[in-house]
Image (tube, rainbow, N blue to C red):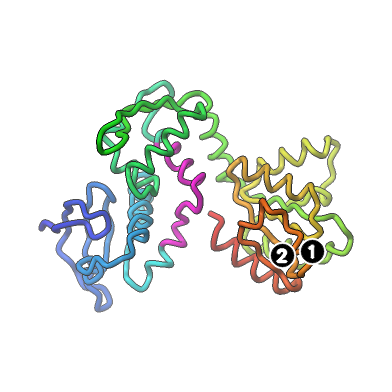
Amino acid sequence: MSIFEHCPICHQAAQYIEPKRDDKTVIAEIICPICGSYSMSLSLGRGSDLPKYDKILLAGLIREANEYGNNEPVLIQEEDIKNLIISGHPPKTKHDKIDKVLYYLSYLSEPGQVIDLGSILTIHQIISFCRDIDELHYYLNYLGENGLIEYTFSDTEQGAVPLLAKLKISGWSKIEELQNQKHTNQAFVAMSFDPSLKSLWENAIYKAVKNAGFEPYKIDENEHNEKICDLIMIEVKKSRFVIADITMHKKGVYFEAGYAIGLGIPVIWLCKDDKNEIENMHFDTRQYNHILWKDEEDLKVRLENRIKATII
């Protein structure tokens, strides 16, 4: 066994097992104290020319595979990096990263147990997909200010250094919610009940969700005896993600999407590609990447692709 000068991904001192040839490609198994164990094309490793954020994503995905008991070895080849990153489902938003930070704390501890962050600080940064310790501190501080953890840190000339953390009861409750949400297969659909959009629901949205492997749920399609606003909140909370078609700009659709965002549930925004519809988008939602659909077939294809690309 030889010494590899640095891990090609996180640049920590690492070891590698003597490389072997696999379909004319030289593959080396790298053992990194931060990323964990993985295999990589030797030419790619020596070049070490991956974009910086791709390295952050790869390091996090490899560490997750090692830390959480995935027995499948991670193999990295240059032509396959983008597919690996997409299929690994790294966090898409800051709330996703916050959930990663909290989940790793729960993974390391039992209720009431204090975690010495100093001993796992760099690994925690990597597995939470943070760019640096400052970003990790920012999320830890957020969790502390919102009553999910007890958190202490030290201010130094170089910045804040995380010291100790302990999940509070509310933090453990959040973990239970995340675990339940991760296993749900439901997609909540918020859209106008106008009869003119019934065909869009049946032939585009419903089929796209089913084709992507999820179960669509639309409130007016299901029998119930409950107060509708209570049922909406229950079903949104039970869903893996929400689809919000703002065509016709119904206030209920904006409410349901906003409620999902507040819970950290992903929202896929839709709107008819019509000048009047686009001009009347609420200013609070214009910042989001809407699928502007032209017809049912256009929406079915694009929505299915968006779900497959962004929902883990």
Magenta region, mostly helix, strand or loop?
helix
**In the foreground, 160 or 206:** 160
Q: What numbered label is drawn on residue 202?
A: 1
- Please name the amino acid that badge 2 sits on: Lys
> Is residue 141 at all visible to an observer of this figure?
yes
Indicate left or right for 293 with 126 as reference: right
Residue bounds of the magenta highlight = 85-104
Q: Quadrant of residue 20?
A: bottom left
Q: Is 290 above or below relative to 104?
A: below
**How far, Cα to Cα, is label 1 from label 2?**
7 Å
Local crowd size for mark 2, using a 10 Å CA cut-off: few (<14), some (14–19), many (≥20): many
Give yes or no for residue 95 being in the magenta stretch.
yes
Residue at the image point whose x is 27% and y is 58% from the top: 9
Sooner in the amino-acid sequence: mark 1 or mark 2: 1
Indicate left or right for 168 with 180 as reference: left
Local crowd size for mark 1, using a 10 Å CA cut-off: few (<14), some (14–19), many (≥20): few
Q: Is 142 above or below relative to 298?
A: above
